[in-house]
Amino acid sequence: MTSSGSPDRAGGRPAPEAPAISELGAGIQLTDVGRAFGPTVAVQGVSLTVPQHGHLAIIGPSGCGKSTLLNLISGLDDPDEGSIDVLGATGSADRLRRCAWMPQRDLLLPWRDVLGNAALALENQGMRRKAARIQVSGLVERFGLGSFERKLPHQLSGGMRQRVSFLRTLVAGKEVLLLDEPFGALDSITRADLQQWLRSALQSEPRTTVLVTHDVEEALLLGSQVIVMSARPGRVAAHYDTDFPAGASRRELLRLPEFTELRDELLARLEEAS
Ligand SMILES: Nc1ncnc2c1ncn2[C@@H]1O[C@H](COP(=O)(O)OP(=O)(O)OP(=O)(O)O)[C@@H](O)[C@H]1O
Ligand SMILES: [Mg+2]
């Protein structure tokens, strides 16, 4: 941002051309992407660029196509119109290989315990089961799941299942992280703790990240850029680059006048878009 948070793409003004990846370092680039499901146009004319190690946060009303966009980027789905480039990969199978995707609803395997589910991505990459369990067990504590390591998904709360799913996504070690409402089912204290943790983790171990959230503060805390999508068909209604002090804690950021100013502006944009 421009800490004052002026939109560069909003309010009917002509949208600037998305800059080419070659200018920014390979990241994620969507060009005029559209996807319809029968008569339902989920997203239309979406162009955006996330530079390598950039963090895009997407906010928008329910049903505006946020999850659809993540699925398209991940390679689980293909657009009807336009093109998608993820670190130079344009085909869906190649995009899939570069992305770790955390779905909006956790897809834990019911017969695997917490450690087994968290370790799944590592095993899929060829690591032996025992080594994978050991590797994730260090993080399980950090995610507040220490005493639940051996529990099965049906023995966990919704928030715990979400944390296991988030952990599994992180340990996959992919260059691109796609997170669909990763903290949606968490209580506010755990949510604040994990937001702070993810902010620091992305600074110390940078990954190109796309985060979908309903929470404007979360978008600003975790996004180096934030887009607001319009109601269906989902289009980019506004686009902000953020530039808050990297070393500031969550608590410090929430008190910064430029943070609260931009939060209020985003809330107003969101209201307009709904
Ligand atoms: N596989 C599908 N088949 C049919 N319609 C779909 C499919 N996936 C998405 N849609 C429709 O596309 C639109 C966008 O859905 P999407 O799940 O992307 O919205 P969203 O912004 O993620 O919503 P929410 O905030 O509620 O999660 C909705 O109208 C939805 O019903
Ligand atoms: Mg969704």
Image (tube, rainbow, N blue to C red):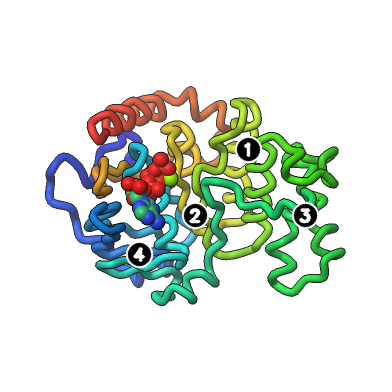
Q: Residue at x 27, y 58 (%)?
A: 38
Label 1 sits on residue: 194
User: Along the horizontal axis of the image, is 263 left or right of 114?
Assistant: left
The tag on residue 209 is 2
The tag on residue 112 is 3
Q: Residue at x 81, y 50 (%)?
A: 138
Residue 65 shows up from this direction: no
Say above or below: 28 vs 2. below
Which one is in front in this view, the residue at disc 4 or the one at disc 3? 3
Q: Quadrant of the C terminus?
A: top left
Q: CA distance from mark 2 to mark 4?
A: 12 Å
Of 110 and 274, the residue lying toward us: 110
| Kind of residue at disc 1 | Leu
Specify the quadrant of the image occupied by residue 117.
bottom right
Q: CA distance from mark 3 to mark 1?
A: 24 Å
Say above or below: 97 vs 161. below
Residue 5, position as x, y percentages in the image = 31, 36
Q: Residue at x 28, y 27 (%)?
A: 268
Mark 1: secondary structure: helix
Which one is in front in this view, the residue at disc 2 or the one at disc 3? 3
| Kind of residue at disc 2 | Thr
Q: CA distance from mark 4 to mark 3?
A: 36 Å
The tag on residue 48 is none
Q: CA distance from mark 2 to mark 3?
A: 28 Å
Label 4 sits on residue: 29
Q: Earlier in the sequence, mark 2 or mark 4?
A: 4
- Disc 3 crowd rating (10 Å Cα; few below 14, some 14-19, many 20+) is some
Residue 114 shows up from this direction: yes
Q: Earlier in the sequence, mark 4 or mark 3?
A: 4
Q: CA distance from mark 2 to mark 1?
A: 15 Å
Q: Residue at x 65, y 35 (%)?
A: 159
Q: Are marks 2 and 1 in contact (CB under 8 Å)?
A: no
